[in-house]
Amino acid sequence: MSGPRETELTRLFPCLHVLRAVGIAMEPGKLLLGAVGIILLAGGFRLFELLPFAPEDAATVGSYGDTPGEWLRTAERTSSLRATKRILHEHFEFGPTRFSESSARLMLAPAVTVLEPALTLFQSGNSITKLAWNITLILWALLVWSIIGGALARMTALQFANRERISIRQALRFSSRQTFSYLIAPGLPLGGIGVLLLFNVGLALIGSVPVAGGPILGLLWGLVLFISFLMATMLIGIVAGWPLMIAAISTEDSDGFDGLSRSFGYLCDRPWYTLLLVGVALLAGMAGWFMLNVIMELTVHLATWSVSIGYFGSSELQLPEAASTTFHQLGTETTAESLVGFWTTQFAGLLAGYGPSFFFSAVTVIYFLVRRSDDGTELGEVAIFLEPEPATESEAEEATEGEAVEAAEVARKIEAPLNSSSADATESDVDGTQ
C-alpha cells in the first residue's frame, strides 16, 4: 500500500497530517452524510417526545430537543459574512453561553449529543423517568453515530491511507455490518462501571444499618474511594476513547474488543501526543469552518445577485441576502419565497454536515498517527474489506453452465472405473466358462 504522501515537513512534524482532515471532510458526499446524521439524530429525539417517560419540557431542554429544521436553520444563522467580519474584528469571548449559541455545537455534534444526556446520569436526585429518558437519548445517539460516523471513518481511512474513495453505499454497508462492534466497544467499560456502582450501592446499604452501619461504612470508605477511582478511570477512557474506538474498528475491520483495547492502549501510551493532535485538529477545523462559511455565503450572494439582474416578476418575491442573519422569516413568505427558502435550507444542511464529517475525519487521521507513534504501523496500513459483487445474468448463466459441465465431467470420471471393472468382470466370466 502506498500510504499518504510524505514531505520533509510532515516527516519533521507528523501532526501536520491532521490538516488533510479538513479537505477530506469538505467533500460533498461526506457533507451530505454528516447532514443525514444530524437529521436522523434530531428527528429521533423529536419522536422520543411521544414516549410515556419523556419530560414535558423535552422540546426546550438542550440541543437534543430541537427539530431537524432547527438544526439546519442554526447552520443558516451562523452562515453570514457579517458574522465572519465580526469574528475578525471583535474580541471573541469563549464561554458557556457563547458555546451554546455558536456553530461549535454543530462541529462537535457527535460528542455533544452523547455527553449532554450522559452527564445528567451522574447527578443526584434523578427520577426513574429522567434516567430512562436520558438513557434513551444516549442509545439513539450511539446508534446513529455508529452507522453514520463509522461510514465517515471508513471513507476517511481508505482515502487517507490509500487515496482510495468508496461510495456512500459501500461505506454504509461496512458500518452497518460493524454496528454491533461499534456499540459493544463503549458498552463493555460502561458495564464495568455499572458493576462497580453496584458494589458502592451495596456498601451504602451496609452503612444504612442502625448503630453499627455508620462506623462500618467509615472503615470501608477507603474501598469506596478505590472503586470510585476505577469508575472515574473507565469513564474518562470512554469519553476520550469512544471516537478512537470507531476509528480503530473502521480502520482495522476488527471487533469491539479490539477497538476498545487499541483506544485505551494508545491513550495510555501516548496521552500528550494525542492531546497535541487534538489541538491541531481543532484549529484546523475552525479554519475549515470559516472557509466553508465564506464559500457558502458567496454562493448564496452570487445566486441572489445573478437572478436579481434578470428578474422582472412580482415584487413580492424577496430573495435571501447574504448580509442578513436569517434567510427568510417563517409565516410571512409567499409560495415562491417558501420554495427558495426550502432549497436554501437544504444547502445550509451541508454546512451543518461539516461538523460530523470533520469530527470523524479528524479522529480517524489522529488514530493513524497515534498508532504509528505507538507500535510503528505504517500510515498506509488499512484493512480492505472486499464486498462480493452481485453477478450479472450472463455471468450467472455462464456459472450455471460451468457447474453443469463440471458435474458431467465428475460423473464421467466416476463411471469410467465402474465400466472398466464391469468389462474386466465380463472377461473373467468368459474365461471361466471356456
Image (cartoon, rainbow, N blue to C red):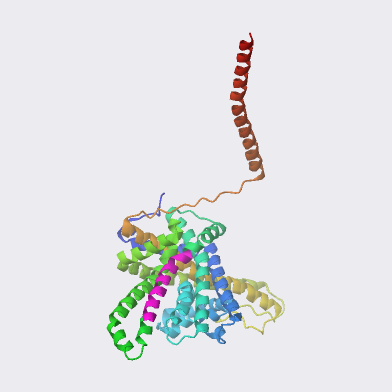
Q: Quadrant of residue 45?
A: bottom right
Asked if residue 273 lies in the magenta stretch, the reply is no
List x then y, in percent, for residue 41.
Answer: 55, 73
Give the residue drawn at x 54%, y 62%. Answer: 29
Residue furthest top as drawn: 434
Q: Is residue 428 left or right of residue 276?
A: right
Q: Is residue 112 left or right of residue 49?
A: left
Give the residue drawn at x 40%, y 64%. Answer: 260
| Residue 281 shows up from this direction | yes
Q: Is the stretch drawn in magenta largely helix, strand or loop?
A: helix
List x then y, in percent, for residue 352.
Answer: 53, 72
Q: Is 335 drawn above or below residue 6 in the view shown?
A: below
List x then y, in percent, for residue 361.
Answer: 45, 64
Magenta region, residue range: 182-202
Asked if residue 186 lies in the magenta stretch, the reply is yes
| Residue 152 shows up from this direction | no
List x then y, in percent, for residue 214.
Answer: 32, 88
Q: Is 297 drawn above or below residue 403 in the view shown?
A: below
Give the residue drawn at x 32%, y 57%. Answer: 375
- In this view, the residue in front, 342 or 323, is 342
